[in-house]
Amino acid sequence: MKHCELARDQDRFGTVAVYDDGNRRFLSFGEEDEQSCILKANPAHPQYSFIRSMLLPLLYIEPKRVLSFGLGAGSLNTAIASACPGAKQEVVELRQTVVDFAYKYFYLPRSKSMRLVVQDAADYVEEPIGKRFDLIFSDLYDAQGLCETQIDDRFLQACIERLQPKGWLVLNCWREHRADQVLDLLDKHFEYLFTSTTPDGNWLLFATHQMPALSQKAFKERARLLSDELGYSLLSFAKRMKPVSRYSL
């Protein structure tokens, strides 16, 4: 089905456009770029496999505070709001236009539980640390690809310092960003480090200080409840999450 352009704006970082094919809506940062996508009938149901994979820590923890770097269309944050209605979210997004479009065209929930901060992620992490978070997601992309901030040691160190002792850090990268220095840094600070590669080529990193001792029965029940809420099976994505061997670092 042909995509219909609904909106377009230009800011100092480039183009932001919204397209619609009747059932789905897309956010784009360039002519050939597809940044985000939602199903209009169910915006809380993530359409991309990497977003679905990023939510895997929900199998192990019930977060009270979540920090996200990079908003896009807000599909990750909308899914969290649906699956974890008690969680307070803070979202750091560079571009005001992206925030405006997420609310207007992608049904991002307007809620006191979700705070949007329009700021460069690199500047945000330079500010004094307030409350710490149970989950931190970083998904920093523009029309050219991954923003280098995301794999910068200083940024990663700042994320680590903002985590609760049992918190999880999740990074969305690409296969070509499998940098040893990123793995080395995370390995120094976390007891558990996992990776997952999606069919689309996303390379995800999951890091945590502590893995909950869940029985197989409790794990499957948690997965069933979350899968019902999210609209897809988390277990199929959990099979792709593999531990990183310390001997390979």
Image: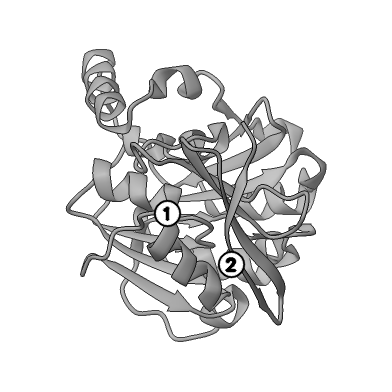
- Residue at position x 48%, y 65% from top? 101
Q: Position of residue 103 (x, y in %)?
A: 38, 64
Q: Quadrant of residue 13?
A: bottom right
The answer to whether mark 2 and mark 1 are in CB contact below 8 A is no
Callout 1: SS: loop
Q: Quadrant of residue 60?
A: top left
Pick the quarter of the image with the C terminus: top right
The amino acid marked with disc number 2 is: Gln
Q: Quadrant of residue 247?
A: top right
Q: Residue furthest bottom?
A: 127
Q: Residue furthest left?
A: 86
Give me the disc on residue 29.
Answer: none
Give me the disc on residue 157.
Answer: 2
Compared to residue 219, the image places residue 66 above or below, namely: below
Compared to residue 136, the image places residue 20 above or below, namely: above
The answer to whether residue 62 is seen in the rendering is no
Q: Which residue is mark 1?
A: 106
Pick the quarter of the image with the N terminus: top right
Q: Residues within 10 Å of mark 1 (few under 14, many from 20)?
A: many
Q: Position of residue 89 (x, y in %)?
A: 32, 62
Q: Say left or right for 74 vs 178.
A: left
**From mark 2 to mark 1, how far is it between C-alphas?**
32 Å
